[in-house]
Image: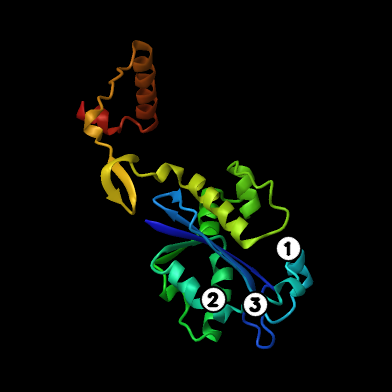
Amino acid sequence: MRQIFLDTETTGFNANLAENPDRMVEIGCVELVNRKLTGNNLHFYLNPERDSDEGALRVHGLTTEFLSDKPKFSAIAQELLDFVADAEIIIHNAPFDISFLDAELARAGHQPFKKYVASVTDTLVMAKEMFPGKRNSLDALCDRLEVDNSGRTLHGALLDAELLADVYINMTRGQDALLMDVGSSQEGGVAVVQVDLRGFVLPVVAANAQELTSHEEVLVQMDKSSGGKTVWRKVA
């Protein structure tokens, strides 16, 4: 399974302004295949053809002067689309990044972003379900899941995509397939062998006398609470 972790930096926070809309200044993509980082990443700085808002500039630090000789989005659009084609795209707060991607793609004469990929997964939605009522920014998740983000002084699209990959792997650790990276078969370019659970003999541990007594006391209390209507008493 091919997954791409994607992050963007922008000149501001509104890609749909009627006049002088905010634009992307950086895109970072990190590839994961079968839950393994491949090192096959994609990264662009972009000339947004406008200045960044003060608030956005404080976040990413990418000045107009630095970006002035960088390619415009239209020049890298096809390379980006080829890289993400048919992959699961994983983004933190996906609607924000997708709105900018769609606006840039429309200017370059392309279809909306989701037309080119298999699916989009929003880790902010995942985090809110896993940690309701808590802060679920990328920094907060790094702290909670013990992902080292000590090198992150400013936001950067590629660094944030790499951190997001680590966060996602930690959030979905219990969903690993029972596969090992050894054997003769190939899956997605990685040698794997499926573990046959029939080869394991699980011990059966019987309850001791004290545990049986405690269990019976709980059943008696439940029967009393129901007025003697518990199913197991009727069957007995």
User: Percent x, y for residue 31?
Assistant: 47, 57
Task: Count the labels in the image.
Answer: 3
Q: Nearer the viewer, mark 2 or mark 3?
A: 2
Q: Residue furthest right?
A: 54
Sort mark 1 into few (<14), some (14-19) or many (20+) by Cα contacts within 10 Å: some
Residue 178, compared with residue 52, is above or below; it is above
Amino acid residing under circle 2: Ile
Rendered view: 123 above or below 73: above
Lateral position of residue 191 relative to residue 154, left or right: left
- Quarter the N terminus occupies: bottom left
Residue highlighted by disc 1: 59
Query: Which residue position is annotated with label 2?
Result: 76
Q: What's under tag 3, amino acid-wise?
A: Arg
Q: Is residue 55 above or below residue 184?
A: below
Identify the mark nearer the N-term, 2 or 3. Answer: 3
Q: Residues within 10 Å of mark 3 (few under 14, many from 20)?
A: many
**Residue shown at the point (57%, 50%) measured from the top left:** 132
Q: Secondary structure at mark 2?
A: helix
Kindly identify which residue carries mark 3: 23
Q: CA distance from mark 3 to mark 1?
A: 15 Å
Q: Nearer the viewer, residue 13 or 78?
A: 78
Task: Tell me the SS state at disc 3.
Answer: loop
Mark 2–mark 1 distance (CA, rounded to whole Å):
24 Å
The residue type indicated by label 1 comes to Val
**Whole-percent x, y for residue 130 in the image:** 52, 49
